[in-house]
Image (spheres, helix red, strand yellow):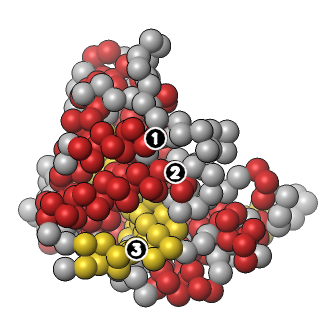
Amino acid sequence: MSYNIAVLSGDHIGPEVMAEARKVLDAAASSEGFSLNYTEGLIGGAAIDAAGEPLPPDTRQLCLNSQAVFLGSVGGPEWDHLPPEKRPETGGLLALRKALGLYANLRPVRLYPQLAAFCPLNFQEREKRVDILTVRELTGGIYFGEPKKLSEDEGLDTMVYRREEVQRILEAGFKAARSRSGRVCSVDKANVLRSSMLWRETAIAYGKANSDVELSHMYVDNAAMQLILNPARFDVIVTGNLFGDILSDESAALAGSLGMLPSASLGETVHLFEPSGGSAPDIAGKGLANPLAQILSGAMMLEYSLGEKRAAERIYSAVEKTIAAGFRTADIAFSGEKVSGTAAMGDAVAERL
């Protein structure tokens, strides 16, 4: 079995960490008897420099024709002078998300015991198991609702959700929960917002029809507090675009470093996988970047797009073993600890598959 993957390495540290992720993916694929056929495409600043636009038509078509899109980080200060629609992030990444029809963002946050001291929580909470998956709706809500208006004295945004949008994101969250501990917390603001009233009504009905998953509800302000006071209470959080944007970034702090955080964005046909952190131009080309977020994003690709769950589990386990063995890039190293470079960290994971 061979799978066709669109690889968009992106900018700055993107190609460095992508190389390590491909190394690990190929080792996992070989161990499970399948292969990955990579086709490179340009996006972001690299595409601007080479083709004059952040998402060339060839890249768009490559992604649409592939079984999954594996993306590095995009952007950098050298392109910040461009108008928003021409910049790597908006004209490249956001345009690609729209072209693929991505509707659900999955951001797992896990606190590894060996890295607990990097977590800002108190000691008692750090000792508990923190393993949270935030499932954020991407196409609706206040970011896309109409009308919008900005005048000298007034700014207007509209928050709209349709029942089918809520049902679709609940389906993604419940599916994910079934492969975890089987618990979903739906987060809304149904005590105030009409769109959240529809959200909760829809969630209650969906939960009754899918009773194999334990469903709870929480207002977003309480959820933000509970993520700090008692993060171990959460398994899968399902929420809207605005709330998910905020809560997923808040929960990211629990892992201790952005270099540990993968993500997946699901579409109707093609899914996209990328690290949660930025392109880190300050360390690009120095071999210092943490490749684990890119590697873990690759594992999510195997699991969610290709159905190769055993290979994905091999990678998850290998990353855990690598951390337990004491391998550290600079962002997750204590003072005095030996620091591994990007390639050495990738090698360490590949050796433990």
Image coordinates for residue 208, horizontal then vertical, percent = 15, 67
Q: Which residue is mark 3?
A: 38
Residue type indicated by callout 3: Tyr
Q: Confirm or deny contact between disc 2 and disc 3 (CB under 8 A).
A: no
Kind of residue at badge 1: Thr
**Residue at point 41% right, 51% down?**
20
Residue found at x 67% / y 57%: 75
Residue 79, compared with residue 209, is above or below; it is above
Is 159 or 132 nearer to us in this picture? Answer: 132
Check disc 2 and report its element: helix, strand or loop: helix
Q: Is residue 260 visible?
A: no
Near mark 1 (Cα within 10 A), the count class, few <14, some 14-19 or many ≥20, is many
Tell me the SS state at disc 1.
helix
For label 2, the crowd category at 10 Å Cα-Cα, with few meaning under 14, some 14 to 19 and many 20 or more, is: many
**Residue sitting at x 19%, y 64%:** 30
Answer left or right for 261 relative to 310. right
Residue 46 versus residue 223: which sits nearer the camera? 46
Q: Which residue is mark 2?
A: 16
Report the residue marked by disc 1.
Answer: 342
Where residue 134 sits in the image (x, y, percent)?
36, 52
- Cα separation between marks 2 and 3: 16 Å
Say which quarter of the image contains residue 268: bottom left
In this rendering, the answer to whether 324 lies above or below 289 is: above
Give the mark, 3 or 1, whose residue is nearer the N terminus. Answer: 3
- Kind of residue at disc 2: Glu
Q: Is residue 6 visible?
A: yes
Identify the image quadrant of residue 41.
bottom right
- Sequence-first tag of 1 and 2: 2
